[in-house]
Amino acid sequence: MLRALPVICCVACIAGASGRAAQPPRTPMNVIAESYVKLVLAMGQHDPDYVDAYYGPPEWKSEADASKMALDAIASKAQALQKQLAQTKPGADELERLRHQYLERQLSALTARVRMLKGERLSFDEESKALYDAVAPTYPESHFKAILDRLDKQFPGSGALAERYEAFRREFVIPREKLDSVFQAAIQACRERTVKHIALPPTESFKVEYVTNKSWSGYNWYQGNYRSLIQVNTDLPIYIDRAIDLACHEGYPGHHVYNALLEKHLVRDRGWPEFSVYALFSPQSLIAEGTANFGIEVAFPGTDRVAIDKNVLFPAAGLDPSKAERYYEVQGLVDELAYAGNEAARKYLNGEIDRAAAEAWLERYSLSPRDRAAQRVRFFDQYRSYVINYNLGKDVVRRYIEGKGGTAARPEVRWKEFEKLLSSPRLPSSLR
């Protein structure tokens, strides 16, 4: 997911189900929600990454641009809204209660971000709790060493394991001239799987752009009216597994579907204005990234993932399909190193190690080539504890959906619970 500068694309007003502009009713909760949206937009004047998407009334954005509210004023207004919210009784149904909790935690995260912008230093775990309503587990080096020992047996020979692993992976790079055709094939496969289980707005769509000089590998810029711009970073080689990963994560059933369903069910159908804005450094991001990553498994469970690559994407990329099973066997082990990036970020942002040591940690414990490790540390600089939203978010979402009966053995239940989560204002803490 992540970006460089937020693209703010406003559509008429909070739209009704027909797509015509329709102002939401002036209920006490909607009055609070409108004020929350305006505070998020005001934060965007101080933090260029804060407003991830906005498609509400354009005059609210114009007002924020013109007023350039000071950070102290934003904090004061947010605290006043929290008190007002505490005195407002939640609605009767479950979504109304979840909405009340959601606004409280989003406002709390906003005030924490103000404190950070004013210079307050939080530890990695304090920051992730304040912003994302979650704290990632801590793993010792021995945890990753045990996984690396198993991987070492996969690549007999001399030299560092990272070098042997990278030599193995070079066979699976998508040629630059075939990149778009491979991605389009992956997107089609992801969409076909998604629409069998989730009713999408008939006008939904997105376009793909290829960009460079970013700290992230892919990003979905949601623009309202069920449309997204997806950017793919081509700074570094793109391996074949990233085709399905990015197509699912950024598109179907990931960020694009998540945002489209929120717009349809909460903004248009219910008239809740707070979902017309997405504050990046907030609890919503753990849900967004967690569902986007778990959505890959939902769409392509078990051997289905290998099958789509072997039968469609390897041939499209001009790669040898007979090597697909071996490739994913290795990748399954590498995926167990997912939390190594969190440990590098935690140590680096807590000041326990410097940039060079963080890059070295990633090279050793996540098997990242030097250039990719350097890109990852740039990501830490820009997005800090946001990194927990990918792996912890995925694990939290998986446990929640499986706890509802949505196991791999019950795919229809899994899709049903997944869609419900995508369409609701749940918080990370409410999934545990």
Image (cartoon, rainbow, N blue to C red):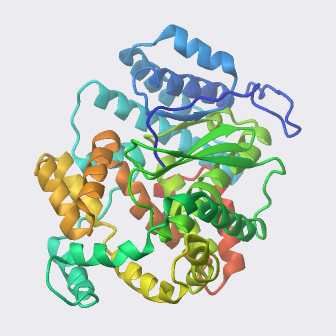
- Whether residue 270 can be seen here: yes
Residue visible at 49% across and 71% down in the picture: 241
Picture residue at 33% right of the left edge, 46% below the top? 379
Left-right relation of 395 to 365? right
Residue at x 27%, y 64% (from the top left corner): 368
Of 384 and 401, nearer the camera is 384
Q: Position of residue 214 (x, y in %)?
A: 40, 43
Q: Quadrant of residue 215?
A: top left
Q: Is residue 245 above or below residue 222?
A: below
Residue at image location 64% in from the left, 29% down from the top: 9
Q: 301 and 152: which one is in front?
A: 152
Which residue occupies the foreground of this view, 286 or 360? 360
* Total numbered circles: 0
Rendered location of residue 173, percent (x, y): 44, 68
Relative to 305, is 95 on the left or the right?
Answer: right
Residue 38 lies, with reference to residue 393, above or below; the image says above
Q: Give the answer, above or below, for where 249 lies relative to 232.
A: below
The extreme top residue here reads 66
Left or right: residue 105 versus residue 417 is: left
- Residue 382 location, quadrant: top left
Q: Position of residue 28 (x, y in %)?
A: 67, 27
